Structure formats: C-alpha cells, structure tokens
C-alpha cells in the first residue's frame, strides 16, 4: 500500500471519530495559543479560587505551548462530544435536585478516554507504526476551548463555553496530541454572540465577566463541586435548586434553544437515581453505602459531604418542610461538621416554630464552632 497523504489520513480519522461517537472533529497545529495573556490575568486576579492545579508550573508550561506536553507534537485533534441527555418529563415528587446535564449519566472522562484510545489504535493501524501521542479529556493543561476554536469547531461564547452554530454548546472536549502531520482546519473566526447578553443577565451570582472568562469563586458549578469547604452564606440563596453543577448560562443561550438536541448515546442518559431525583434521596445517603447509586458518576467527585452540603442548601432554598426529619437526623447524628453546618442553615431557612425548636435543641449539644455559628445565625433570624 502506498504511503497515505495527510489529507487522506485526516479524512479517514474524522470518519472514524464520528463512527466512535464523537460529534465534531477538527485539527489544529501545535503553535502556542494567542490568548494566553487572558488566562494569565485571570490567574493573577485569583479568579480560579482554590483550584491550585491550574497555576502550577506544569499547567502554565502546557498552556503556553502544547509541545511542552509532547515534544514531538505536530498536530492536535480536537473532538467535541454532545452530552445533553433525554430526561424524564415527569417528576417523582417535589422539590427535585437539579444536576448539570453532563453529570446525569456515566462520567464522560472514562467514556471519551476509551473512545480516544480506540481512535489512536485506528490511526496507528492506518500509518502502520507507533505514533507519539497524549490524550486529554478535560484533564490536561491545555487551553482547550481556544484549541477547539482554532480547529474550526466553533467560537468561545460570552458564557465561556465553546458554541457551534449547528449544535449549541453542550459539549465535552477531548484533545489528542499527535506526533504526525495532519491537515489543519481553518479557525472559526466569527463571533456570533453579537449583542446578546442573556447568559450574563441570567447568572444568579454574576460570575460571568466581560472578557469571556468567569470568576470561579462565584460560579455555582465551582461552589457545588470544586469548593470543598463552607459555601459563603451570601451565595447560598443564589444556588437555587442546583445540587451539582449548573447549566443556566447554557439553558438561556439562543444557540442552544434553537439548535441543541439531546444525544441518543446511551452512555450519557440519566441513571435512574439521577433522573429527576427528590432532595430526600440525597439527604438519606448513608456513609456506608452512598456510593452505590452513583457508581461511575461524576457526582462522586463531590464526595458524600459535598453532596449533602449542597442538598441541604437546596432544601433550605426550597423551604421543604417535609424534609425537616431528614435534616434533624443529620444535624444531631452526622459525623461531618460541614454537613451539620449547612443543615443548620437550611433548617433556619425553612423557618417556623418546629425549625426553632430543632435548632435550640441542637444548640445545647453541638460542640463544633463552625456548626454553632450557623445555628446561632439561624436562631437569630427565627427568634420572636
């Protein structure tokens, strides 16, 4: 067989990527990004919060030049996968816990990593030799949305998401750094957000900034996932009913409203526990078996303490009186002070004579200062 040229190879790779389930495929060169300065200013302002892994030396080197991650890199395949699932039209009860669309099914990291490795096997079979490569699915130190824009997949919207004019923005991104030359795609140059500010206006915490970055410290996704400690009191009401992540800025985007369609990929469909779950189901997660209904789920990232912290806030925001027995049990018996602290706030938020009695009783037995602060704050609001 004669040697395959870069254009033919690229076309074959794209066809195989689509067959494997990737929605969009593009190719970029390995040159340094043009907008590194925006990222550096973002870090300098501390808007990455506690995500220190974004600012370590390896992260900075990789984002400054992909060849720091793979010295032989000559091409970068950028893959976008639609994760928006079909969800139930009915609810099992009220209120429900809202979960970011990407987290309703299995963890996309494992799914897309497996498919990317299959694509690499195909590439090496095509060229008939080993190919230096690195695969990253939202895990590597790359400016992946800029790479996707350079590979022609779309533009970076005001909500900081990659937006494709025919598919919207519900994408997980994967990059494959390759030590072979492929045909590079033309960058997506137009900005089709125009004068629209729906995402900025809809963000409950004002986290979306004018330079197409966001202040992670205010973002509901950060607060409910990456933040491992106490959620600031003033931000809790803005979390609303989001127990893990947030899709508001995508839900209001006209490009999603018009063009984004649910995927039929079984890997991204909601598991039964997460298809419109009631808050009580989260409040009842026991230390000994909480992982069972969440096996292979992205929600494992928050651990039990984070999920119950978030569930308590959402329960308080919902004013769910029927949840008071669950909250009371947690306040008196849960071993984690992070959980108890947010449960105390939630009980105070629900309010009423019963809530006042529960908090007063807990005040006499609680020993941890962080929890006592929350109890006292709730009692001060509820006191006659």
Image (spheres, grey):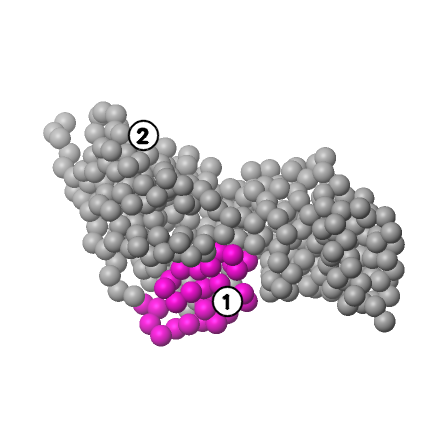
Residue bounds of the magenta highlight:
192-220
The reply to whether residue 96 is visible in this rendering is: no
Foreground residue among 42 and 2: 42
The disc label shown at residue 121, or none: 2
Q: Position of residue 228 (x, y in %)?
A: 59, 47
* Helix, strand or loop: magenta stretch: loop
Secondary structure, mark 1, is loop
Q: Is residue 211 above or below residue 297?
A: below
Report how far apart the C-alphas of labels 1 and 2 lie in the structure. 44 Å
Q: Position of residue 119 (x, y in %)?
A: 33, 35
Q: Position of residue 52 (x, y in %)?
A: 46, 44
The disc, 1 or 2, on the residue closer to the chain's N-terminal end is 2
Residue behind mark 1:
206
Secondary structure, mark 2, is helix
Q: Quadrant of the N terminus?
A: top left
Q: How many marks?
A: 2
Q: Quadrant of the C terminus?
A: bottom right
Nearer the observer: mark 1 or 2; the answer is: 1
The reply to whether residue 314 is visible in this rendering is: yes
Foreground residue among 75 and 353: 353
Residue occupying image coordinates x 35% and y 52%: 40
Residue occupying image coordinates x 33% and y 72%: 194
Q: Is residue 44 above or below residue 318?
A: above
């Amino acid at each position: 067989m004669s040697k395959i040229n870069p254009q033919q190879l690229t076309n074959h790779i794209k066809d195989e990527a689509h067959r494997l389930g990737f929605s969009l495929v593009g190719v970029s060169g390995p040159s340094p990004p043009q907008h590194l300065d925006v990222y550096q200013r973002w870090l300098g302002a501390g808007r990455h919060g506690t995500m220190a892994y974004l600012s370590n030396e390896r992260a900075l080197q990789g984002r400054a030049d992909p060849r720091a991650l793979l010295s032989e890199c000559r091409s970068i395949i950028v893959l976008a996968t639609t994760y928006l699932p079909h969800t139930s039209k009915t609810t099992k009860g009220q209120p429900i816990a809202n979960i970011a669309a990407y987290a309703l099914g299995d963890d996309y990291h494992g799914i897309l990593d497996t498919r990317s490795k299959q694509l690499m096997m195909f590439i090496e079979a095509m060229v008939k030799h080993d190919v230096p490569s690195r695969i990253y699915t939202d895990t590597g130190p790359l400016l992946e949305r800029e790479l996707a824009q350079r590979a022609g997949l779309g533009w970076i919207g005001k909500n900081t998401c990659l937006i494709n004019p025919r598919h919207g923005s519900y994408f997980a991104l994967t990059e494959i750094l390759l030590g072979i030359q492929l045909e590079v795609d033309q960058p997506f140059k137009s900005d089709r957000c125009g004068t629209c500010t729906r995402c900025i206006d809809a963000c409950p915490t004002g986290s979306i900034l004018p330079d197409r970055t966001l202040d992670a410290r205010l973002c509901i996704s950060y607060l409910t996932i990456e933040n491992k400690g106490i959620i600031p009191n003033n931000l809790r009401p803005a979390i609303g009913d989001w127990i893990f992540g947030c899709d508001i800025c995508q839900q209001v985007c006209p490009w999603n409203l018009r063009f984004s369609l649910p995927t039929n990929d079984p890997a991204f469909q909601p598991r039964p526990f997460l298809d419109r779950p009631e808050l009580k189901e989260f409040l009842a997660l026991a230390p000994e078996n909480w992982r069972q209904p969440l096996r292979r789920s992205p929600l494992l990232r928050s651990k039990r303490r984070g999920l119950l912290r978030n569930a308590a806030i959402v329960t308080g925001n919902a004013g769910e009186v029927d949840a008071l027995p669950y909250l009371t049990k947690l306040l008196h018996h849960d071993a984690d002070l992070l959980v108890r602290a947010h449960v105390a706030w939630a009980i105070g938020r629900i309010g009423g004579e019963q809530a006042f009695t529960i908090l007063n009783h807990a005040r006499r037995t609680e020993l941890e200062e962080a929890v006592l602060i929350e109890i006292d704050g709730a009692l001060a609001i509820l006191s006659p």
